[in-house]
Image (cartoon, grey):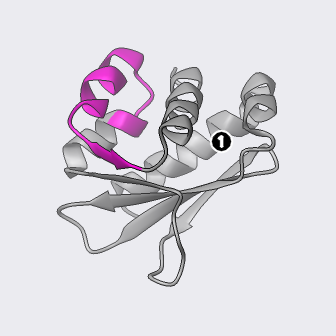
Amino acid sequence: MNAIGMLLAEVTERVRGKKHVQSMARGWERRVGIVVDEQQTRWQLVFAQGEASFGEWSDGTQADLVLRGEEQAMVQLFAGNELVYTAAKQKLRIDGPLRDQLKLDAILRLVCK
């Protein structure tokens, strides 16, 4: 597993460890596609029933939101530092409904260290 995969594993663990984030995510059933410009592997972060999971994103699966950008910005986004998160978010392109973008932003901010 590469750096992005390890960071996504960490994010899912942080979601599991924070009950208020789980309740916030409950009822929000979304797939977030993650496309890193320098890599062949595409990832997905899945929110379902208040839980988060991750895995490789296959071509046959539709994503509700898609994050695209350079590896460095993705690493900064998922690393868990809120100040770095804010700067990294501005370097990425996010495609999807604004409401889902805001929900993802809130969840990722709440799981920052």
Residue 39 shown left or right of residue 6 in the figure: left
Q: Residue at x 55, y 36 (%)?
A: 99
Spot occupied by residue 50 in the image (x, y as percentages of width and height): 79, 43
Q: Is residue 52 magenta?
A: no
Reply above or below: 37 against 67.
below
Spot occupied by residue 58 in the image (x, y as percentages of width and height): 48, 79
Q: Secondary structure at mark 1?
A: helix
Where on the picture, by quarter, is residue 33? bottom left
Which residue type carries mark 1? Answer: Glu
Q: Residue at x 56, y 26 (%)?
A: 106
Q: Is residue 79 magenta?
A: yes
Of the pair 107 and 112, the residue shown nearer to us: 107
Q: Residue at x 45, y 46 (%)?
A: 7
Q: Residues within 10 Å of mark 1 (few under 14, many from 20)?
A: some
The stretch in magenta equals 77-95
Where on the picture, by quarter, is residue 31? bottom right
Which residue position is annotated with label 1?
A: 13
Spot occupied by residue 109 in the image (x, y as percentages of width and height): 51, 23
Task: Specify the farthest residue to the top.
Answer: 83
Residue 108 shown left or right of residue 3 in the figure: right
Q: Quadrant of the N terminus?
A: bottom left
